[in-house]
């Protein structure tokens, strides 16, 4: 058969020992294992928590090869396979006993003020926009060129449906089912006073709408654009957020898993 499976794993002890065990099991079934993000792989297997899944997605530059995760920590939204179920997972994989879900990703495109320099980042969970020195950030927010608000506060979060259970949820945002076609803007400690008024709750935006931010900074401060926990620092800019063309494919073995996971993790 000689089909290649890419393995990604985090450095904790449990993940290391599971990695060895899984490699042996897969090789005994005729698969070849790669740790180098092989472009001809048929599967990207991540061992660790949700953070390990996110890192695999970024390290593989949003690989088009489908992902699946074996969870070595607490339950995870990306990491469906539990350690006691590894043998069943391998059988189900060989028999194609799964379906493939496409996860939306977000794209942020920035243009630095006073120049035509631009940059682009992608995120599977969310972007966080905040000041680099922990001072208040001021952002003019537009939806499809309609001015929505002038935000003043700690940060704005722009999260995907899959990312809605992460930082967004801690910030009081809603859980969006992973297949819902939209994304979410969530404020972090918005200031509401006579001087500043902005939405206190999250706003769900339809898939085709463009969210624009004009980040205004005092003096020569920078701001942070954090993509799934990866920090980028920039001077004043206009940023457009859209649902990207890129999808992350994930294998799903248990149809009920999402709802079971919500209950198990949060309730
Ligand atoms: P981390 O600081 O190790 O993990 C943050 C927590 O978020 C972990 O418990 C992680 O699960 C969980 N998580 C990640 N993606 C999730 C998702 N889609 N749904 C539910 N929970 C999720 O950092 P990390 O592991 O590299 O993850 C980066 C993410 O951390 C960011 O994308 C952001 O969403 C999140 N974060 C959350 C807060 C907050 O809640 N106040 C603050 C900063 C960042 P695992 O333990 O399974 O990895
Ligand atoms: Mn983590």
Image: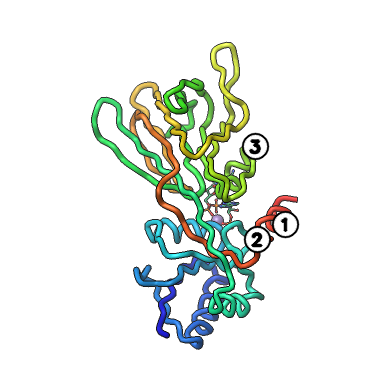
Toward the viewer: 179 or 10? 179
Q: Residue 37, position in %: x, y? A: 37, 68
Marks 1 and 3, the one that precedes in the sequence? 3
Q: Residue at x 45, y 43 (%)?
A: 243
Q: Residue 112, position in %: x, y? A: 30, 31
Q: CA distance from mark 1 to mark 3?
A: 19 Å
Q: Residues within 10 Å of mark 2 (few under 14, many from 20)?
A: some
Residue occupied by mark 3: 172
Q: Residue 208, position in %: x, y? A: 46, 37
**Height in image: 217 above or below 26?**
above
Residue farthest along the bottom direction in this orientation: 28
Q: Residue at x 57, y 18 (%)?
A: 197
Residue occupied by mark 2: 75
Q: CA distance from mark 2 to mark 3?
A: 21 Å
Q: CA distance from mark 1 to mark 2?
A: 8 Å
Toward the viewer: 101 or 125? 101
Quarter of the image with the N terminus is: bottom left
Please say if the residues under marks 1 and 3 sit with CB atoms less than 8 Å apart. no
Tell me which corner region of the image, top left, top right, bottom left or bottom right, holds residue 172: top right
Marks 1 and 2, the one that precedes in the sequence? 2
Cβ at disc 2 under 8 Å from ligand 1: yes
* Mark 3 secondary-structure assignment: loop
Residue occupied by mark 1: 264
């Amino acid at each position: 058969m000689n089909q290649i499976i890419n393995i990604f794993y985090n450095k904790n002890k449990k993940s290391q020992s599971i990695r060895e065990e899984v490699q042996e099991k897969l090789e005994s079934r005729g698969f070849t294992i790669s740790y180098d993000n092989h472009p001809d792989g048929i599967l990207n297997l991540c061992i660790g928590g949700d953070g390990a899944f996110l890192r695999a997605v970024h390290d593989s530059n949003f690989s088009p090869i489908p992902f699946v995760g074996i969870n070595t920590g607490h339950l995870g939204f990306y990491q469906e396979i539990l350690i006691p179920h590894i043998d069943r997972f391998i059988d189900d994989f060989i028999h194609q006993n799964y379906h493939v879900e496409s996860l939306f990703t977000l794209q942020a495109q920035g243009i630095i003020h006073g120049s035509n320099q631009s940059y682009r980042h992608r995120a599977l969970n969310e972007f966080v926009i905040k000041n680099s020195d922990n001072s208040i950030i001021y952002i003019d927010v537009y939806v499809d060129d309609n001015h929505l608000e002038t935000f003043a506060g700690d940060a704005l979060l722009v999260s995907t449906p899959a990312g809605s259970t992460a930082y967004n949820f801690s910030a009081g945002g809603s859980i969006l089912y992973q297949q819902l076609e939209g994304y979410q803007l969530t404020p972090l400690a918005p200031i509401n006073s006579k001087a500043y008024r902005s939405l206190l709750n999250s706003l769900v935006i339809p898939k085709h709408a463009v969210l624009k931010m004009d980040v205004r900074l005092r003096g020569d401060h920078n701001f942070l654009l954090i993509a799934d926990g990866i920090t980028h620092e920039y001077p004043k800019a206009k940023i457009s957020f859209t649902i990207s063309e890129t999808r992350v494919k994930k294998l799903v073995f248990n149809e009920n898993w999402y709802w079971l996971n919500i209950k198990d993790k949060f309730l």
